Amino acid sequence: MTETTQEKKQPTLKEDLEKALAAISVPVAAIEEFELLTISDDAAFLLREVAKKVKERLAVYAQLLEDLLQPDSGLAAMNECSFFNESEHEKIVKNYRELMSILRRFTMADVEATEAAYQSFLVEALPRWDAQKDWLSKVAKQLHDAWKKAEPLHGESGYFG
């Protein structure tokens, strides 16, 4: 019995992603790290959607660092910025600049809006992101540990309305 065209196995999103990422030497671990399986199965421009997912994830960490550098009036941000000394603050600035550079690299690709531009972004951005992860993990641990200390919060008013 021969298979009809309709019965032939269609590639799955995961298979499409693995093929696309392998073509640009990106490890398949990126599929899980950036939740790429949440991309629509009918995405016409797969690398654009992958690049958007990468940008979304990196934007979260850039915002975290921005809040440490320029806290708004929120209680968490006002306290968290005090958890770091001057030397650590300088590292936050350096790494914030790196993340913002990666995010602006996405903007450049998005303005061009070609598969080649998104491919170039991914090839450049992912190794730079990998270089940030260990440091960001240490920042997250420092934030976590600082919140466990029973110290008065900055900006605590005692008013509970």
Image (cartoon, rainbow, N blue to C red):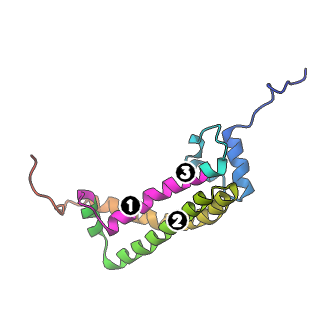
Crowding at mark 1 (Cα within 10 Å: few <14, some 14-19, many 20+):
some
Indicate left or right for 141 with 158 as reference.
Answer: right
Determine which of the numbered discs, if any, sits on residue 99 in the image.
none
Q: Residue at x 26, y 69 (%)?
A: 82
Q: Is residue 109 above or below residue 28?
A: below
Q: Is residue 147 above or below residue 160?
A: below
Relative image position of residue 149 (x, y in whole percent): 24, 61
Pointer 2 residue: 104
SS for dot 3: helix
Q: Is residue 87 above or below residue 45?
A: below
Crowding at mark 3 (Cα within 10 Å: few <14, some 14-19, many 20+):
some
Foreground tag (1 vs 2): 2
Going from N to C along the chain, the mark reached first, 2 or 3, is 3
Q: Residue at x 50, y 70 (%)?
A: 98
Relative image position of residue 64 (x, y in whole percent): 38, 61
Amino acid type, residue under disc 3 in the picture: Lys
Q: Residue at x 65, y 51 (%)?
A: 47
Residue lying farthest top? 1
What is the C-alpha distance between the residues marked 1 and 2? Answer: 17 Å
Pointer 1 residue: 64
The answer to whether residue 68 is magenta is yes
Q: Is residue 26 above or below residue 128?
A: above
Which span is picked out in magenta? 50-76
